[in-house]
Image (spheres, grey):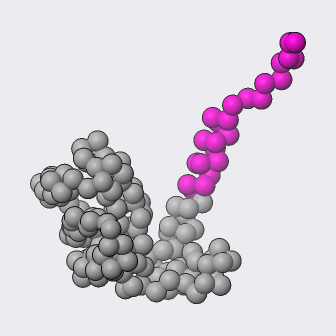
Amino acid sequence: MAASRQPVLDQLVARGIATFPQVAFVKAISPPYGDWSPETNERFIDEINESRPDVLWVGMTAPKQEKWVRENQHRLRCGVVGSIGAVFDYFAGTVQRAPQWVCDLGLEWAYRLSREPKRLWERTFISAPQFLGLAMTEALRTRAPANHSARTH
């Protein structure tokens, strides 16, 4: 596991051990917020690689975590790397999730936006629509053309 604050990671590991006793939690790293120096990045990659995890969960907020994974994945010695963001806080119990009925309606994003508007407004109203537009354009661009040729028997 990488990122999040150390008290959150401590709670997450304690709950993880209690919930999944068959899983070995080998390392929990809380890097500093803000920009990292190349030396700090090297130190964290070395710590991750020394622990040799089968699975590495990264929670730094989007899109920072995805960018970090992409830039460093070729250097990480682990089986699976997943960017999971706020899941650390949810699982540790330090951030309350939306009520179940809100989740069932697919509106957890609105609940989160109402609780953290300064942090999430740009992601919700600018980045997400841009991403959807790019994803749709890419899907249409790479879609295989239908084969309309006549079949031969």
Image position, residue 56 (x, y; %): 31, 58
* Residue at screen point 34% across, 62% down: 57
Residue positioned most to the front: 22
Residue placed most toward the observer, 20 or 146: 20
Image position, residue 144 (x, y; %): 69, 31
Q: Is residue 136 above or below residue 64?
A: above
Residue 102 falls in image quadrant: bottom right
Residue placed most toward the observer, 146 or 26: 26
| Numbered circles on residues, count | 0
Image position, residue 106 (x, y; %): 65, 74
Q: Is residue 72 magenta?
A: no
Residue placed most toward the observer, 64 or 92: 92
Q: Residue 15 vs residue 126: left or right?
A: left
Image position, residue 34 (x, y; %): 25, 67
Q: Which residues are magenta?
A: 130-153
Q: Is residue 51 above or below residue 118?
A: above
* Residue at screen point 30% across, 54% down: 54
Q: Is residue 41 visible?
A: no
Q: Is residue 126 visible?
A: yes
The quadrant the N terminus occupies is bottom left
* Residue at screen point 30% across, 75% down: 17
Residue positioned most to the top: 153
Residue 48 falls in image quadrant: bottom left
* Residue at screen point 59% across, 48% down: 135
The quadrant the C terminus occupies is top right
Residue placed most toward the observer, 11 or 37: 11
Residue 27 falls in image quadrant: bottom left
Q: Is residue 149 magenta?
A: yes
Q: Is residue 10 above or below residue 30?
A: below
